[in-house]
Image (cartoon, rainbow, N blue to C red):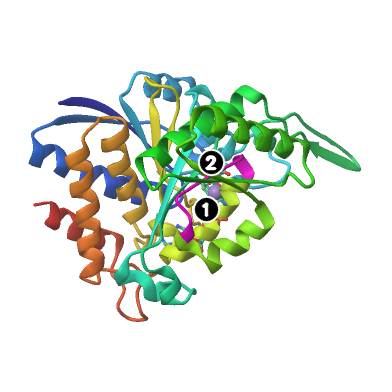
Amino acid sequence: MHAEIVVLPGDGIGPEVAAAAGAVLNAVAKRFNHTFTFSEHDIGGIAIDRHGEPLPASTLAACQAANAVLLGAVGGPKWSDPNAKVRPEQGLLAIRKALGLYANLRPVRTHEAALHASPIKAELLQGVDFVVVRELTGGIYFGDKTRDTDSASDLCRYTVAEIERVLRSAFRLAQQRRGKVTSVDKANVLETSRLWRDVAARIGREEFPDVALEHQLVDSMAMHLLAKPREYDVIVTENMFGDILTDEASMLAGSLGLLPSASLGEPGAVGIYEPIHGSAPDIAGKGIANPYATIFSAAMLLRHSLGLEDEAAAVEAAVHAVLDDGVFTADLAAKGHAVSTATATDAVLAKLG
Ligand code: NAD
Ligand code: IPM
Ligand code: MN
């Protein structure tokens, strides 16, 4: 098949990990006889530097015309002044919103060969396999913001329609998996959460009676996630809770550098595929970032945007195989045994043949 893929490398380690995933997609094209064309565009801090805005119209137009978008990461200290007029992160939020990508799938899986990298006991980690469905275009991220000299506010607002559609994504996913949805909220305090819980219960009862639904408060969820991570199948939650819980969940897998994501909308929407981690300014430019999260994201791109299931599975199998071989970047390796981003990427390419 032919596919047009837009690559948005962004800032910090973004370009390093995006290049790794791009090389993997190229290898997939070769091995499976596809033609993928790639075009790079600016987003985030680099777009502010070059164009004065974090999401130039030309970048958005290119994404809208593509089959899928692969993104590295945005942000960094250069653009982090609390009083800055424009911020790299605004570009990311704006593109998610503009493409209508309300469902952010963040799969969390442990890898036998990487259990040592987790601070959690190995016996709790074996077989962990869940997906967090994070609502991505609503809530406190997108509510009105105000700031004056002695106060500031961020409005958290959700409509019934916004909650319904992301809940349906989660229930449908659970139907293809182990049939269980855990809906996470703060219904003991927040009105938006009480609405969320009502809608989740109704959608579950009326539309997905075959799926088991449980509700969990977000604070105790943060604890249960570490204490009994194997219990979970699909976890669905609002924007900010999903952001926080998934960085926490990365410690089950052993590193932020292992967790991919797919941001999806209604059928026909152009999906964005990116690691859940950020631009990692502390290691940027050193060639030591873990590329696996972005390579796993490329696998999700093949599966969800291009419908290439065999190709996606081949990429995932290649990463699992290099993990089994002990090809670890510094975030996963024992001291003195780390490989570079380039070496880790080459190992994946070699497995793909
Ligand atoms: P971060 O995710 O960039 O880094 C957190 C820690 O994890 C750092 O120690 C980093 O070195 C490590 N890490 C992250 N990815 C890694 C990888 N692939 N390999 C090895 N180690 C890795 O979070 P932060 O430091 O809080 O944020 C830095 C910047 O990134 C901020 O400007 C933030 O807004 C931005 N950010 C962007 C995205 C995105 O583009 N999707 C996501 C999160 C944060
Ligand atoms: C993520 C990031 C972003 C978010 C930031 C950079 C806007 O943390 O993709 O998880 O909070 O959504
Ligand atoms: Mn985040």
Q: Residue at x 59, y 52 (%)?
A: 244
Residue wearing tag 2:
134
Please state which of residues 259 and 199 is positioned toward the viewer in this rendering. 199
Question: Residue 152 appears in which quarter of the rendering?
Answer: top right
Please state which of residues 107 and 24 is positioned toward the viewer in this rendering. 107
Determine whether the beta carbon of the residue marked 1 sits less than 8 angstroms from the nearest atom of ligand 3.
Answer: yes
Contact between labelled residues 2 and 1, with CB atoms less than 8 Å apart = yes
Q: Position of residue 267 (x, y in %)?
A: 38, 21
Q: Relative to 314, is 322 above or below?
A: below
Determine whether the beta carbon of the residue marked 2 sits less than 8 angstroms from the nearest atom of ligand 2.
Answer: no
Please state which of residues 317 and 218 is positioned toward the viewer in this rendering. 218
Q: Is 321 left or right of 298, judged from the image as shown? A: left
SS under mark 2 = strand
Q: Which residues are magenta?
A: 231-240
Instruction: State which quarter of the image contains the N terminus.
Output: top left
Residue 91 visible in the current orientation? no
Q: Quadrant of ligand 2?
A: top right
Residue 87 visible in the current orientation? yes
Q: Residue at x 25, y 72 (%)?
A: 326
Q: Residue at x 57, y 39 (%)?
A: 89
Please state which of residues 184 and 303 is positioned toward the viewer in this rendering. 184
- Rate crowding at label 1 as few (under 14), some (14 to 19) or many (20 or more) other CA atoms within 10 Å: many
- Rate crowding at label 2 as few (under 14), some (14 to 19) or many (20 or more) other CA atoms within 10 Å: many
Q: Is 117 left or right of 149, judged from the image as shown? A: left
Q: Position of residue 286 (x, y in %)?
A: 38, 62
Membership of 235 in magenta stretch: yes
Picture disc at residue 206: none
Q: Position of residue 42 (x, y in %)?
A: 43, 33
Picture disc at residue 246: 1
Q: Position of residue 201 (x, y in %)?
A: 62, 35
